[in-house]
Amino acid sequence: MTEYYLDNAATTAVLPQAKAAALEAMEGYGNPGSLHALGRQARKVLEASRNQVAKSLGCGPGEIVFTSGGSESINTALFGAARKNRHLGRHILSTQIEHDATRNTLKALEIQGFYPQLVSPEKDGRVEAGKLAAALRPDTVVVSLMAVCNETGAILPIREIRRAMEEVCPKALLHVDGVQGFCKIALPLADIDLLSLSAHKIGGLKGCGALYLRPGLTLAPLIYGGGQENGFRAGTEALPQIAAFGAAAEERSRRFAAGAAHMAGLRDRLIAGAKALGWAVNTPECSAPHIVNLSPCRGRSEVYIRALSDQGIYISGGSACSRGKKSHVLSAMGLPGKNIDAALRVSFCPETPVEAVDRFLEAAKATERQLF
């Protein structure tokens, strides 16, 4: 049985280049903080990997801090930015469709006296720039938006909100959750103060991420200790994961245009096929190339997921972090309950073959016919 993995928004297969880099880094077991030859060799690998990630993003290596993943990067950015600007106010602006790493961090900041405001999306999943701009206040200290919604593929208006911030709250910091956007869409780095990244979404290893800080920006660290990462993130660097991240970022950025075009073709093919089945499409018309959210006519998502899994086709019902809970994203969009209960997320990587989309549609149609 040929297997087709269509859950790349949850995690991706490790790229061969990333695996090779990790294995090589494991051969040299020195601590990057040690001054002897093995330590210097490890430090060289660390900084080469930092250069790879920075180059793929289009920034300097000094603006990249390695972390344990996207969640740590988001926590570090939001806690650090809010505390840095608390003398300016306590208002934080975000949206109702953010990842739980952002939503739950904002809840923690609310307990500490901040006032998060979450803007609602439109019914197609978009977040309107005008609605975001209208919610800005002079006492807004942080704005936090995802570049790409991990459930629907909606692209958020980063450039537009930055322009509005310059008018209303010019000293506020703009944090972008770039976990689903990095190496998938062009990120407007010149408009961003803080950007969170994750390695395993682009073919790297789990347990590694990065935080971009614009030049000159300093924040208090979230983790204190031995002063690694220029004092910003303590803890001995996870060199195999970091080396794999660098290799994956280099490979994905090298093939960015071709990969994005291929995934966009898969997205359009899938949407056309789903519409032919009479399914609802919960992804906006202009979306990221790698994520499509669909609702079959009947049934529940877990029925489709299990039936398709038995046929070697792997998809999800939404965020892997939600573990079966009703989607807060689709609920915020105001979709009917039956659409939310049946929602399926199909997500691609540049290596996803065209036949995976066709096989999914065939199997989904057969499942629907057999079970309903």
Image: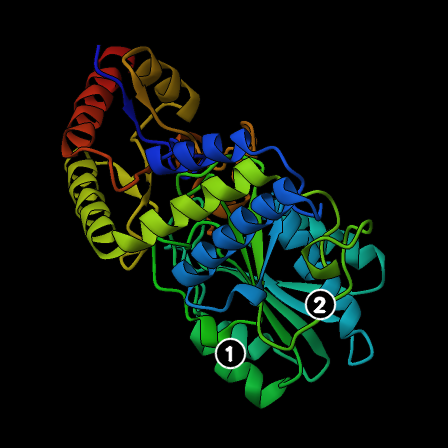
157 up-or-down from 263: above or below: below
The label shown at residue 162 is: 1
Residue 180 is situated, as x and y percent measured from the top left of the image, at 44, 50
- Tag in front: 1 or 2: 2
In the displayed structure image, the side of residue 78 where residue 192 appears, left or right: left
Front residue of 110/300: it is 110
Q: What residue lies at 42% left-to-right and 54% top-to-bottom? A: 182
Q: What residue lies at 27% left-to-right and 57% top-to-bottom? A: 285
Which image quadrant is residue 6 in? top left
SS assignment at label 1: helix
- The answer to whether one can see residue 99 in this image is no
Residue 247 is situated, as x and y percent measured from the top left of the image, at 40, 45
Front residue of 245/287: it is 245
26 up-or-down from 270: above or below: above
Tell me the quadrant of the picture where the N terminus can be found.
Answer: top left
The label shown at residue 81 is: 2
Q: Identity of the amino acid at label 2?
A: Ala
Mark 2 burial class by Cα count in 10 Å: few <14, some 14-19, many 20+:
many
SS assignment at label 2: helix
Q: Give me the C-alpha separation between circle 1 and circle 2.
A: 16 Å
Q: Earlier in the sequence, mark 1 or mark 2?
A: 2
